[in-house]
Amino acid sequence: MDYKVLTQDDLLEIFPFGKSKLGQLLRSGVLPVVKVGRDYLISEKELDRWFERNKGREIFY
């Protein structure tokens, strides 16, 4: 497997909103993440797929 795993800190650098909004997205299941203990992880590939699937769609949280 040749992909990068992103952490919550990485996601905060990618998304143009704050920690509170990111937390809502992570806990709600909107983002396809894996929860390991208290941490949420997502592969860079899966995040790219998620963006493609949701392009043009409005997400409320």
Image (spheres, grey):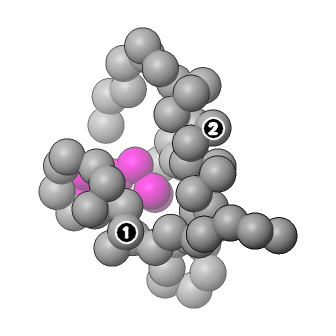
The amino acid sitting under disc 1 is Asp
What's the magenta bit mostly, secondary-structure-wise? helix
Q: Which residue is mark 2?
A: 49
Q: Nearer the viewer, residue 33 or 49?
A: 49
Q: Furthest residue to the front? A: 2
Q: Horizontal and vertical percent for residue 1?
A: 82, 70
Packing grade of label 1 (10 A; few <14, some 14-19, many >=20) is few
Mark 2: secondary structure: helix
Q: Furthest residue to the top? A: 56
> Is 33 colored magenta in this rendering?
no
Counting the numbered discs, the total is: 2
Residue interval drawn in magenta: 20-27
The amino acid sitting under disc 2 is Arg
Q: Is residue 18 left or right of residue 25?
A: left
Q: Is residue 59 left or right of residue 15?
A: right
Residue 15 visible in the picture:
yes
Question: Decide: marks 1, 2 in contact (CB < 8 A)?
Answer: no
Q: Horizontal and vertical percent for residue 7?
A: 46, 73
